[in-house]
Image (cartoon, rainbow, N blue to C red):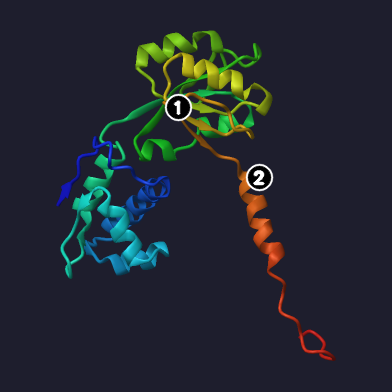
Amino acid sequence: MRRSDMGDPMNEIPEVVIQRLPLYLRTLSALDAEGVTVVSSQDLGERLQVTPAQIRKDLSYFGRFGKQGRGYRVPDLIRELRLILGLGREWEMVLLGMGRLGWAVAGYPGFAQHGFKVVACFDADPQLIGKTAGPLVIQDISALAATIQQHGIQIGIVAVPAAAAQQVVDQLVACGVRGILNYAPTAPRVPPHVWVQNIDPAVALQAMTYHLSQRKPARRPAGRAPA
């Protein structure tokens, strides 16, 4: 098993492929916990509802994995995907905005399980400064730059109202943050070297209701009452 040269500028990987890699890793980790040591692309595809050909094509962007007819060694593929995704280290993050959403994000245990840690949280509301959110003390936003520099932070989580999101994102970018997880219901503008992942449950629900509204219920034969 080998990985390709990730620094090759010609090796442009579609974003949709990168978005699927964490799903592969999650499924492989579940298989590993079940004691499965080898999995075929067919079995992996059935768990993920992805075709085996798609899995093989996705992985081919990063090198050659497994052996034809024998499948993938689960522990080896987990290790390779973790390296590809940059999960060989703990990523420290800052959280901006300590409303109800911010408090929920601060207490979310899933970050630590996957190698991420919120090390500081901030708000501009004087009534919140000094309060504790789990092990963290809410700091004034004026301390943001010093904290980012001290910890070498590269990821910021934005959980502020839409009206404040662009200003907060601008502050993070000015402090050297290159990755932003944005919960604000807006799409902030950032320089090309900064990656933003927007998370808006309302938008996801609206896309869902489109599909629900387009699927009309089956018509019952005329003259028959419902059972």
Horizontal side of 31 relative to 207 (left or right) equals left
Horizontal side of 132 relative to 212 (left or right) equals left
Instruction: Please tell me which residue lies in front, 166 or 78.
Output: 166
Q: Mark 2 points at which residue?
A: 202
Q: Is residue 12 above or below residue 47?
A: above
- The residue that appears at 29% across and 36% down in the rendered structure is 86
Residue 69 image point, x, y percent: 18, 70
Total marks shown come to 2
- The residue that appears at 20% across and 44% down in the rendered structure is 4
Residue 176 image point, x, y percent: 42, 17
Label 1 SS: loop
Q: In this view, does 67 lie above or below 130?
A: below
- The residue that appears at 66% across and 14% down in the rendered structure is 127
The numbered disc on residue 11 is none
Q: Is residue 8 above or below residue 55?
A: above
Q: Label 2 sits on what residue type?
A: Ala
- The residue that appears at 62% across and 14% down in the rendered structure is 124
Q: Name the residue under label 1.
A: 192
